[in-house]
Image (cartoon, grey):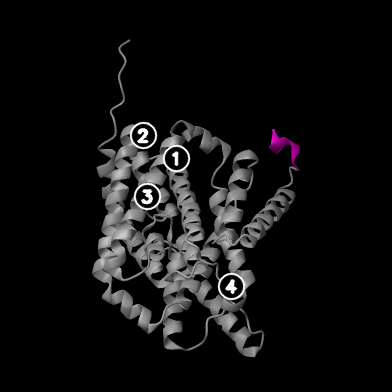
């Protein structure tokens, strides 16, 4: 086996993984793939986790990466943007309901024909923060390993589809050097210090209080600072790319040989369910364009069940309306956390009864 031929030292394996991640990120950015700094490390980590394994990214790094993305969202928030979001709340609620209804339909089909336990499959198809869904599923006596695999299979499918849609729509990747340049004078260093403090405080306060609190905490604090004009938020490019990589590596390493083997019989159904949901969300985004007076790419990313952090990264890289994407994703996240248990119980009702063979 490949794992037996590699060094047993964790340090050497980390060096190998990080080197491969850096190379994949660089190659994807050279071909102007949106969110290449996220997708490259994620793809490499999936392969590494399944074929080699033995590594887990500390959760604190994943949360720190989310905190950076939260503060990055806050940079896009202005009074004009916030007023636009407030005026669009009926359409945003409709978009959230449509996405949840479509997810429920796909979930029912999966539990009916996918060959997975009803409760487990129901939690696996619930479109919310993957980590929150896994934790809640464990409390409901579902298999958290299968739920995690289903959630992250969907996340990866949605991220890849979102990046490809952006790429083939001809959307240029953001020039990071101009968007996130640092002024390394006293004012710039002070702004960077405040930005890092906002991330740390936001994570510390909100991580256990809110779903995806590690992202929402810095986003909310950063929005207050941004709108007040108290100080300019500064996030240098290396910090952003490190945050993208942490999120990608964390998601990728969630896949290991044992977990994949346990769901292999239903893997094609998971992929099919993910692709169906992506297609349905694309259609709903198309219908919402005239209602919300926004572009298709923004609404596609906003309605896609791929996670607040990853969809925001793609939105930032493709000049989509980050505020609309973040607002819709956050609204759906809170809604799912509130009604997730009821959704899962409803979907589980449609599971087939196990066939009984007479002895």
Mark 1 or 3, nearer chain start = 1
Mark 2 or 3, nearer chain start = 2
**Residue that numbered label 4 is attached to:** 175
CB of mark 4 within 8 Å of CB of mark 2?
Answer: no
**Residue that numbered label 2 is attached to:** 117
Few, some or many C-alpha atoms within 10 Å of disc 4 (few <14, some 14-19, many ≥20)?
few
Main secondary structure found in the magenta portion: helix
Q: Give the alpha-carbon distance from disc 2 to disc 3, as whole Å.
A: 25 Å
Q: What element carries label 2?
A: loop
**Residue that numbered label 1 is attached to:** 146
Question: Disc 4 vs disc 1: which is toward the camera?
Answer: 4
Residue 116: percent from left, percent from top: 38, 34
CB of mark 2 within 8 Å of CB of mark 1?
Answer: yes
Mark sitting on residue 279: 3
Between 300 and 235, the one nearer to me in the picture: 300
Mark 4 or 3, nearer chain start = 4
- In the image, residue 276 above or below residue 240: above
Q: Give the alpha-carbon distance from disc 4 to disc 3, as whole Å.
A: 30 Å
User: Magenta region: which residues?
Assistant: 1-6
Looking at this rendering, what residue extends furthest in the top direction?
359
| Residue 250 included in the magenta stretch of the image | no
Q: What element carries label 1?
A: helix
Quarter in which the N terminus is drawn:
top right
């Amino acid at each position: 086996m490949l794992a037996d031929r590699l060094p047993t030292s964790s340090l050497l394996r980390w060096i190998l993984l990080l080197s491969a991640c850096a190379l994949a990120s660089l190659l994807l950015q050279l071909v102007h793939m949106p969110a290449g700094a996220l997708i490259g490390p994620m793809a490499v980590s999936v392969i590494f986790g399944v074929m080699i394994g033995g590594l887990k990214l500390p959760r604190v790094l994943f949360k720190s990466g989310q905190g950076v993305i939260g503060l990055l969202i806050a940079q896009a928030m202005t009074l004009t943007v916030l007023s636009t979001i407030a005026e669009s709340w009926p359409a945003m609620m409709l978009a959230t309901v449509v996405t949840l209804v479509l997810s429920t339909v796909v979930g029912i089909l999966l539990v009916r024909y996918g060959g997975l336990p009803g409760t487990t499959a129901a939690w696996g198809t619930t479109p919310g923060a993957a980590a929150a869904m896994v934790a809640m599923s464990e409390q409901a006596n579902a298999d958290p390993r299968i739920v995690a695999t289903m959630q992250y299979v969907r996340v990866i499918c949605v991220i890849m589809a979102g990046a490809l849609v952006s790429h083939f729509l001809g959307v240029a990747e953001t020039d990071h050097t101009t968007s996130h340049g640092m002024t390394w004078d006293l004012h710039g260093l002070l702004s960077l210090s405040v930005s890092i403090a906002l991330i740390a405080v936001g994570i510390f306060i909100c991580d256990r209080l809110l779903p995806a609190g590690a992202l929402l905490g810095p986003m909310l604090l950063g929005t207050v600072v941004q709108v007040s004009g108290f100080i300019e938020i500064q996030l240098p490019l290396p910090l952003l790319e490190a945050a993208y990589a942490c999120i990608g590596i964390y998601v990728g390493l969630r896949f290991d040989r044992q977990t994949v083997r346990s769901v292999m019989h239903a893997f094609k159904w998971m992929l099919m369910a993910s692709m169906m949901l992506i297609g349905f969300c694309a259609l709903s985004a198309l219908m919402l364009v005239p209602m919300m007076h926004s572009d298709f790419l923004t609404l596609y990313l906003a309605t896609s069940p791929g996670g607040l952090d990853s969809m925001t990264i793609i939105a930032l890289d493709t000049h989509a309306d980050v505020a609309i994407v973040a607002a819709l994703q956050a609204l759906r996240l809170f809604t799912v956390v509130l009604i997730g248990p009821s959704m899962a119980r409803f979907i589980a009702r449609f599971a087939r009864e196990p066939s009984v063979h007479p002895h």
